[in-house]
Structures are given as structure tokens and as C-alpha cells.
Image (cartoon, rainbow, N blue to C red):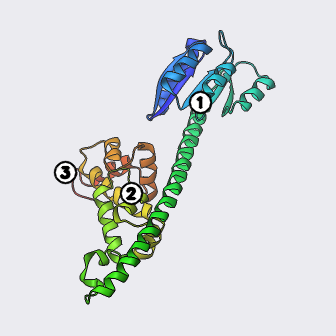
Amino acid sequence: MYRVMITDDEKVAIDSLKFIIEKHFSDVEIVATARSGREAVEKAMAHVPDILFMDIHMPGISGLEAIREIRKFNSRMKVIVLTAFDQFEYAKDAINLGVMEYLLKPVNRSKVVEVVERAIERIREEKEERQKEQELREKLKWAEESLKSLQNLRVSDTQFTGTSTKGSEDYPEYQGYKSGALIKRAKNYIKENYSKPITLEDVAREIHVSPQYLSKLFKEETGENFIEHLTAIRIRNAKSLLEADNLSVKEICYSIGYSDPNYFSRIFKKIVGLTPTEYKERVMAVNPGDPNKPV
């Protein structure tokens, strides 16, 4: 859920924004409203919103002053400034504060929906970028650990060769390093854990190789990358659950490892050609007497 806070000294303006946002976004929650700049700072500190609507002209400290205070402890928040005054200096100050949008009141419904959609998309992109940075750090760590493991393996292999007449095929721990065996273990792990928010790093850690090596090996052995394989499994299971017709789309989304129903719907439509709801309706239309029977 994306957390939204609305600050305006006019209750009718707050109610109007709440109505528009709640009507058009199922994945957005209005966590707080405020009628003054000081109240906005206090509530933003308590609720930590992802998106903030802020009127410039507020009782006490101005909206811009309130934004400066909030930015000290919430630098990632997306701010949308509202004002009835079309003055360039206000817009300039707002831009310097990292404000995403500057809207003149009264704002129309479509503009509010558009700006919230863009804010959500930016939040999602920034989150993905942070995840990529974290993954890169983990890859570097795993590369170092894998190098050490390989060095230790070479030492063990040398000792093994010099002290035994048996070949490495007689020992399961050596067979585990074969590419086919590694991919089989990786696939089994994905199959058993697809309903969790697993990553390439999780699988690599499970089979004791570096994420880089697993990514390269996965593509070479299967012809698809890790995400494509995981997504295919999730969508296949989603179709089965939709055909059973005993869970909502949101419940199915969570049960196959996704946390965002809107994102799940987009991925499903991209692969299947229909939204989850459309797919379920088609199944029911073709098999009205047996919802468990696939199309």
C-alpha cells in the first residue's frame, strides 16, 4: 500500500482529494490529514507518508516551511504542492525543495489521478533501483565468498586426487558442482518457494554459488533467465487458481509471491493477453458448470 497525507486549511479541499484518490486507487491509503503547517510536520513524522499533498498558504508556518521540516526526516517522500496563486517564486521555491508537481487550485480530477499515478511509478522505480544496488553489493560479497570456496575446493580436490583411487563421480558433493545438477537444485528451490518474495541471490545462496554464475548458468541451461522462469511458474499457478474460482484476484496475487495487485495484473496481461479478471470471466463463460476445468 502507498501512504498518502493531505494538508490543506480548507476541509472541503481535503475531502475532495480524499474522494478522488480513494475512488481511483485500491492500493493507496490516506494515512493522515492536516489543517496547518505545524500539524502537517507532526503527522508526517508520525505516519511517514510516501506521497504528500501540501497547500502553500497555511495557518502558522507556510506549506513550504513545513515541507523543509518534513524533508529532514523523510527525504524520499513525493510532494505535490497545491496553491490558488500562480506565482513563479512559489514554484521556484517548491522545485528547490524537490517537489514533484506544482498544481494550481482548483485542480481537476484527471490531473490528481495522473499525478498520483506518476508518484507511485517513481516510488516503484526508486525502490527497484535501491534493490538493484543492494543486489550488486550482495553479488560482490557472493563473488568474494565463491572465489574462496573455489580455492578451497581446488585444495580439497588436490588432496582427494592424491589420497584416493576413486573418481569424483563416486562422491555426491562433487556431482553437485555439475551444471545440470545445479540447475535442477535451483529449479526445485524456485518451485518450492515461488510463493515467497525470493530473489536470484536467495537461490544462489541455497545452492552455494555466486548470483552471477547462477544467472549465466540458468540462461545457458534453460534458455530463460531467473525472473522469466519464476514469473512463468507464478503465472501458471495464478491461472490454475483463477480457474478454481474460489479466491479473489488480490488473494491470488499474494499467494503466488506478489505484493502489488496492480503489478500482478500488468504482468499477467503481458503474458496471458488478458487481465486476471478477464481470464476468470472467460473461464466461467466457457465452463459455467465446471469452474475447475481449464480453458
Q: Where is residue 61 in the image (x, y as percent from the top left)?
A: 67, 13
Q: Which mark is residue 254?
A: none
Left or right of 96 in this view: 7 = left
Q: Residues within 10 Å of mark 3 (few under 14, many from 20)?
A: few
Residue shown at 36% from the left, 80% from the top: 157
Q: Nearer the viewer, residue 51 or 217?
A: 217
Residue labelled with disc 3 = 289
The span from disc 2 to disc 3 (Cα, nearest Å) is 42 Å
Query: Residue 21 versus residue 53: which sits nearer the camera?
Result: 53
Q: Nearer the viewer, mark 2 or mark 1?
A: 2
Lower position in the chain sequence, tag 2 or tag 3: 2
Sequence order check, earlier mark of 1 and 3 = 1
Amino acid type assigned to the residue bearing label 2 in the image? Asp
Question: Up-down: is 67 above or below 170?
Answer: above
The N terminus lies in which quarter of the figure?
top left
- Label 2: which residue? 202
Q: What element carries label 3?
A: loop
- Front one among 139 and 105: 139
Which residue occupies 37% across, 83% down? Answer: 158
- Indicate the position of residue 291 as horizontal and vertical percent values: 22, 51
Whole-percent x and y of residue 99? Answer: 67, 31
Q: Is residue 175 above or below residue 286?
A: below
